[in-house]
């Protein structure tokens, strides 16, 4: 069975590097993108099992990506990363993204403690 591919989409190089370290330790294949256009191109090319995406990527909101993928009938797992908001804002953002079709939402500040667990749960 081939190793699942994970597509990471984030404009922040520090966040991207940190996620790559975690995923690299889990022995998944990775692709990265720093823009919405690059993300969709790589998505169509590599057909990842999981997309990890910043909920606010340049001119494209995470909900736009979710609608684009789900609107095409694509059931790939989607993990949205939300920025450093106050807890009540995170709850509202999480509820909204899950209703749009995200499979999971993780605060960026919780990546170190929870990313591996969430990835294993989704895949």
Image: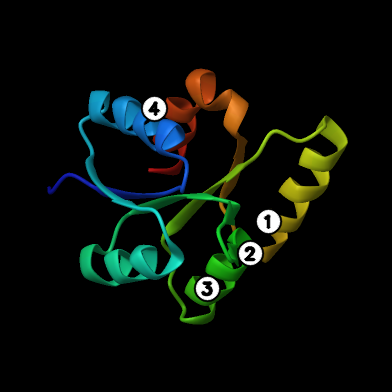
Instruction: Tell me if 23 is positioned left or right of 107 in this view.
Output: left
**Mark 4 and mark 3: span between their CA atoms?**
28 Å
Compared to residue 65, the image places residue 2 above or below, namely above
**Mark 1 and mark 4: span between their CA atoms?**
23 Å
Residue at (30% x, 26% y) in the render: 21
Determine contact: label 1, label 2, CB under 8 Å.
Answer: yes
Instruction: List x then y, in percent, for residue 108.
Output: 58, 32
Determine contact: label 1, label 4, CB under 8 Å.
Answer: no
**Mark 1 and mark 2: span between their CA atoms?**
6 Å
**Mark 2 and mark 3: span between their CA atoms?**
10 Å
Q: Which label's residue is closer to the chain start, 1 or 4?
A: 4
Instruction: Tell me if 69 is positioned left or right of 5 in this view.
Output: right
Q: In this orientation, which residue lies closer to the viewer: 117 or 18?
A: 18
- The residue indicated by pointer 4 is 18
Instruction: List x then y, in percent, for residue 70.
Output: 52, 73
- The residue indicated by pointer 2 is 63
Observer able to see residue 50: yes
Determine contact: label 4, label 2, CB under 8 Å.
Answer: no
Using the image, tell me which numbered label, if any, was put on residue 97.
1
Q: Classify 10 Å Cα crowding around label 2: few (below 14), some (14-19), many (20 and above).
A: some
Dot 2: element: helix
Q: Nearer the viewer, mark 2 or mark 3?
A: 2
């Amino acid at each position: 069975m081939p190793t699942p591919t994970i597509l990471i989409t984030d404009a922040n190089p520090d966040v991207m590097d940190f996620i790559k370290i975690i995923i690299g330790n889990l022995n998944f294949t990775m692709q990265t993108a720093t823009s919405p256009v690059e993300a969709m191109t790589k998505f169509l090319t590599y057909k990842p099992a999981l997309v990890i995406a910043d909920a606010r990527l340049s001119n494209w909101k995470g909900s736009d990506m979710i609608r684009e993928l789900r609107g095409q009938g694509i059931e790939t797992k989607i993990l949205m990363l939300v920025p450093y908001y106050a807890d009540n804002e995170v709850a509202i953002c999480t509820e909204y993204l899950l209703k749009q079709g995200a499979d999971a939402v993780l605060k960026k500040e919780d990546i170190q403690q929870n990313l591996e667990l969430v990835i294993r749960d989704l895949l």
